[in-house]
Image (cartoon, rainbow, N blue to C red):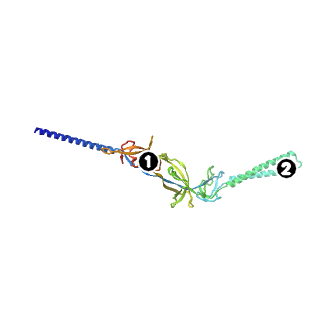
């Protein structure tokens, strides 16, 4: 009886130990699970994208105002005030048409004074010539020679005075008005009646409509590089009822950088000029062009924003997943690449990257190589 009781006690003790061990193991598992779950909830959340095989795509767009291809500044340097403005900005004018009339009253007064001086010299010459004629026979040689010298000197003075008078006459005839040198459009008018035009500043800017029209637009540098001089684009004229005209690329020039550089190329803009031939244009119309162009062979493309740089070069942060007994673990890992070229959103890269990689494109907080992460 005693032996049975002891055996029963030992059996119950073993069951209790096994139960306690099971409960402890269960609690440990539950604690570990919830600990891992809690820890995972505190990890940075990341959004990922996978690489794709494709072509780079450029959005080529620009806008501006239609303007004449050739505009000539017209100056007036006489220093005379404007007497009458006979045109308005935006007015069409003909070759030879008077644009401005200037107040020549001061010049005409100077002309009258100089003409009077010349007339006075003529009277003096007439007087000397009569004296020479009267005293020529039997007169003293010295006196005659002096009279002849006076006549010669006076004739020289009269020649100078005649040229001065003629110069003033020509200046009045030449600068009394400002005329259009060709058929055109008054693009800018900088003249007011009664006001002397500023020295060195054009009073009128006249556009030569016979040369046609052009559109100048700032285009992203990478996109502008996909255009070629001589290429024909569709240009949308936004004035009134929108319509399309043809524009030919005539020039692609530097306009200056706006910002720094992006991976795979320089940012900034270039000035693209299009020649437009259209009889319905009058100048100043807002216009734009836009096209999408795929370039190059299909290559491995990744989001441009995902490319980062350190001392060793360009790299991507990709998610690497490791299987664990209590759940998979994900970490951010550096993957070095080289950017071959890029458009506005994608970059063609080479290096240790494949189409199954999960590339981190956004994170809830800064992420570095080796940091545990969780997917968004």
Q: Position of residue 49 (x, y in %)?
A: 40, 49
In the image, taking residue 195 as reference, residue 264 lies left or right, namely left
Mark 1–mark 2 Cα distance, whole angstroms, equals: 103 Å
Question: Residue pushed farthest left?
Answer: 1
In the image, taking residue 188 as reference, residue 11 lies left or right, namely left
Q: Is residue 91 above or below residue 323?
A: below
Q: Position of residue 335 (x, y in %)?
A: 41, 44
1 or 2: mark nearer the eye: 1
Q: Nearer the viewer, residue 47 or 11?
A: 11
- Tag shown at residue 338: none
Residue visible at 41% across and 43% down in the picture: 334
- Tag shown at residue 305: 1
Q: Secondary structure at mark 1?
A: helix
Q: Quadrant of residue 368?
A: top left
Q: Secondary structure at mark 2?
A: helix
In the image, taking residue 290 as reference, residue 41 lies left or right, namely left
Q: Quadrant of residue 142?
A: top right
Residue 123 in sight from this viewpoint: yes
In the image, taking residue 136 as reference, residue 22 lies left or right, namely left
The answer to whether marks 1 and 2 mark residues whose Cβ atoms lie closer than 8 Å is no
Determine which residue is flagged by label 2. 132
């Amino acid at each position: 009886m005693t032996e049975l009781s002891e055996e029963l006690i030992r059996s119950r003790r073993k069951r209790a130990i096994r139960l306690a061990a099971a409960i402890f193991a269960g609690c440990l598992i539950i604690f570990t699970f919830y600990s891992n779950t809690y820890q995972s909830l505190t990890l940075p959340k990341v959004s990922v994208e996978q690489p794709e095989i494709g072509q780079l795509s450029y959005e080529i767009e620009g806008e501006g105002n239609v303007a004449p291809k050739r505009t000539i500044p017209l100056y007036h340097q006489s220093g005379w005030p404007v007497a009458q403005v006979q045109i308005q900005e935006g007015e069409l004018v003909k070759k030879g048409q008077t644009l401005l009339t200037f107040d020549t009253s001061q010049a005409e007064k100077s002309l009258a004074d100089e003409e009077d001086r010349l007339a006075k010299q003529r009277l003096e010459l007439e007087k000397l010539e009569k004296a020479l004629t009267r005293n020529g026979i039997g007169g003293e040689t010295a006196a005659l020679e002096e009279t002849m010298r006076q006549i010669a000197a006076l004739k020289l003075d009269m020649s100078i005075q005649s040229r001065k008078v003629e110069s003033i006459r020509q200046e009045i005839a030449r600068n009394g008005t400002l005329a259009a040198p060709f058929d055109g459009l008054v693009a800018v008018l900088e003249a007011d009646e009664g006001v002397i035009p500023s020295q060195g500043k054009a009073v009128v800017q006249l556009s030569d409509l016979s040369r046609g029209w052009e559109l100048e637009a700032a285009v992203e540098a990478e996109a502008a590089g996909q255009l070629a001089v001589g290429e024909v684009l569709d240009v949308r004229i936004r004035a009134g009822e929108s319509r399309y005209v043809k524009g030919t690329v005539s020039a692609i020039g530097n306009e200056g950088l706006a910002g720094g550089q992006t991976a795979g190329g320089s940012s900034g803009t270039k000035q693209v000029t299009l020649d437009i031939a259209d009889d319905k244009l009058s100048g100043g119309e807002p216009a734009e062009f836009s096209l999408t162009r795929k370039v190059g062979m299909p290559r491995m493309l990744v989001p441009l924003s995902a490319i980062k740089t350190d001392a060793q070069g360009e790299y991507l942060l990709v998610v690497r997943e490791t299987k664990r007994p209590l759940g998979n673990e994900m970490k951010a890992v550096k993957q070095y690449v080289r950017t071959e070229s890029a458009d506005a959103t994608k970059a063609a890269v080479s290096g240790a990257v494949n189409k199954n990689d999960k590339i981190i494109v956004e994170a809830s907080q800064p992420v570095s190589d080796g940091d545990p992460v969780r997917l968004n």
